Image (tube, rainbow, N blue to C red):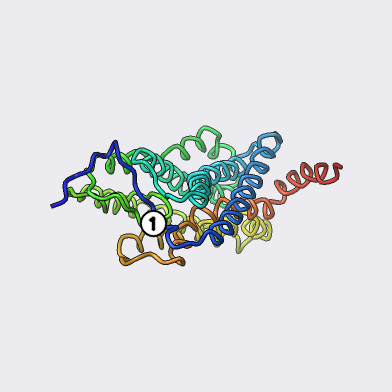
Amino acid sequence: HVPPLDNSTYSHTLDGLSGLSSHQRRIYFALALASYTLTLLVNVMLMVTVAAEKTLHRPIYVLVCNLCANGVLGASCFYPKMLHDLLAEAHVVSYVGCLAQILVLYWYVFGEFASLTVMAYDRYVAICRPLAYGAIMTTQKVCALLACSDTMAGAALTARLPLCGRRIRRLFCTNWALVKLSCANTIVNNVYGFALMFLHVAQAVLIGVSYGHLVRASLHSRRNRRRFVQTCLPHVLTLSLFTGSLLFDVLFERYGGGRLGAVHHALAVLFMVAPPLLNPLIYGFNLQYLRRHVLANLTPQLRAP
């Protein structure tokens, strides 16, 4: 029997970077720094454009702006610690720091799903009920829908567990990685995890129903088909990328077993790396009105000496 550790006084060891040479770490550091810088740049540029242009203060652009803000949160949950570890000899994180990363990770995942679900509902109303769009999609309703997420429960359930191990075989802290180190009954955490999976499946079903109506409506109008291609296809790409990468990570961590390889580590961080970088590019290039304003703001800066 392994006695529980004092959670408040010890640190966890992250094994995700073990085995890399100094040369490899420098290469990965340069790539990660470039990716993080580009992610911040494109997201902040789009958010500033939406905030500065009053004509863009409409639900679809506010939702895209919220998606970008959430992307900055997700990227910042991962990159700073990763960049530090690539230059450090010891890859450790305090128990409190691990819980904080888990909490921010929950916030990011819930926020992404909430944004994508509300965006699907917004497109359904815009295409299928255009005359009632202004009355239905008010600023108050958009904010209320985005706020309907619970990010504290998962971290709180994990924080109550006594732990009997220190080694986390990941690049970053996740809830299930910490739960697996517990020497107590984790049935409540398992039930909560399955409840979350059911919730996200329900959201996916809701989005699927919305798109079923959108496809049917688009078949009867050239204008609706154009709006579907400009706003709905980017949404499908974003949803598929985020959901697929997150689902792979969750299922592999729970049921994959064995030592994690380099490929899995890359796929495991995909849901925190790819969507924050690609979302503003996808929406910025496909939403014609938004693209015009972004390019108008960017052109004077490119011409400046």
In the image shown, does 271 or 79 lie closer to the viewer? Answer: 79
Q: Position of residue 75 (x, y in %)?
A: 53, 47
**In the image, what residue occupies the spot 42% across and 51% down?**
172
Residue 91 is left or right of residue 71, and the answer is left
Amino acid type assigned to the residue bearing label 1 in the image: Asp
Q: Residue furthest left?
A: 1
Residue 150 visible to the viewer: no
Image-quadrant location for residue 139: top right
Callout 1: 10 Å neighbours few (<14), some, many (20+)?
Answer: some
Q: Position of residue 116 (x, y in %)?
A: 50, 50
Say above or below: 236 vs 77.
below
**In the image, what residue occupies the spot 85% across and 45% down?**
303
Residue 257 is left or right of residue 223, and the answer is left
Say above or below: 267 vs 42.
below
Q: Position of residue 22 (x, y in %)?
A: 53, 58
Say above or below: 229 vs 144.
below
Q: Position of residue 168 (x, y in %)?
A: 34, 53
Disc 1 element? loop
**In the image, what residue occupies the spot 54% across and 46% down?**
71
Residue 44 is left or right of residue 110, and the answer is right
Residue beneath label 1, please? 15
Residue 10 is left or right of residue 86, and the answer is left
